[in-house]
Image (cartoon, rainbow, N blue to C red):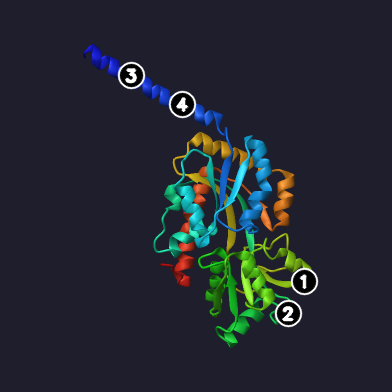
Amino acid sequence: MSAKSIERLIGFFLLLLASFTQAQNVETNYPNKPIRIIIPQSSGSATDTLIRLIAPKLTEQLGQPLILENKLGAGGIIGADYVAKSAPDGYTLLIGATSWITIAPHVYSKLSYDAQKDLAPVSIFAVGQNVLAVAATSPSMNVKDLVASMKINPNSLNMASAGIGSTSHLAGEMLTSMANVSAVHVPYKGAGPSVMSLLSGESQWVFTPMQGPIALIRSGRLRALAVGGNVRSAILPDVPTVKEAGIEGYEMKNWYGLLAPAGTPKAIIDKLNAAIVKVVSTPEIKEQFYAQGSEPTSNSPQEFSQFIREETERMSKVVKKAGIKIE
């Protein structure tokens, strides 16, 4: 080997070592600037509310401010797509939830990102209940009454949702499908408007994340008929599950988690994971989450990835049975 070739080889290895050292320094010093967190839903939504509750404590753990940005559109997929295409450096993160991570792949014919390939799971931070609610003036006092009304007069009642392909849409479609009844689906731009439609009389029932209607339920303006989980909610202990109300096998809950662009270094993912695990285990956050009808929880990136795979498969069956498709 010539002296010139040896010099080139040495130069190559020195460049490789420098790149490796630089990468190590970036990961070791992370974060050294503010972190953007994209929230694909509107202000006041369950997703927005929960991340804003833990953001101050995450800031304490990470030592850098969090910039929370609501990037709306297409049931969450615009925000998810934005993060999927962002630099994998840990400074642009996504709040993921059932709708745009595990439902969207089956609802949209063409999706510009693959949640399982283009996003790196960090950790779940909350699991929440859906609640089936009607106006306080509704003649339906329980699920059986509501189902009976839809059987007697098919498509006579409007079912509100936060949008086509949203969790509330799927929760409602599951109910009508399993009860063998029909309703007119009325999609709104977010959970808030869908809940308020009950008060105006535009819609007669909604299945929605509990955070939205809980204050109206407590004030007596709305009536909770059931919750969608397999166990009752500690927030509404007197409200039965849909299964208890007579629809065997029903279960639809919401989850909320943090994801990064695929390719984000493992050291950064692990640092973010450790921060979430610590924050959601604090008594203060537990109390605040329970007050919102959600349960604080966490898992490892590997466990979160497996959870997403399993939920995506489960949602595939639900979407197919409901016949939901967006071109």
- Mark 1–mark 2 contact, CB under 8 Å? no
Q: What residue type is labelled 1?
A: Gly
Mark identifier at residue 22: 4
Separation of disc 4 and disc 1 at Cα? 59 Å
Mark identifier at residue 137: 2
On screen, residue 16 versus residue 249, left or right, reads: left
Q: Whole-percent x and y of residue 322?
A: 48, 72
Mark 3 packing: few (<14 Cα in 10 Å), some, or many (20+)? few
Pick out the residue farthest to the right. 219
Label 3, secondary structure: give it: helix
On screen, residue 56 versus residue 120, left or right, reads: right
Mark 3 vs 4, N-terminal side: 3
Separation of disc 3 and disc 4 at Cα? 16 Å
Q: Of the residues tagged 4 and 1, which is closer to the observer?
A: 4
Mark 4 vs 1, N-terminal side: 4
Mark 1 vs 3, N-terminal side: 3
Q: What residue type is labelled 3?
A: Gly
Separation of disc 4 and disc 2 at Cα? 65 Å
Q: Whole-percent x and y of residue 106?
A: 44, 63
- Mark 4–mark 1 contact, CB under 8 Å? no
Label 1, secondary structure: give it: loop
- The residue sitting at 67% across, 37% down in the picture is 60
Q: Which amino acid does label 2 sit on?
A: Thr
Report which residue position mark 1 lands on: 220
Mark 4 packing: few (<14 Cα in 10 Å), some, or many (20+)? few
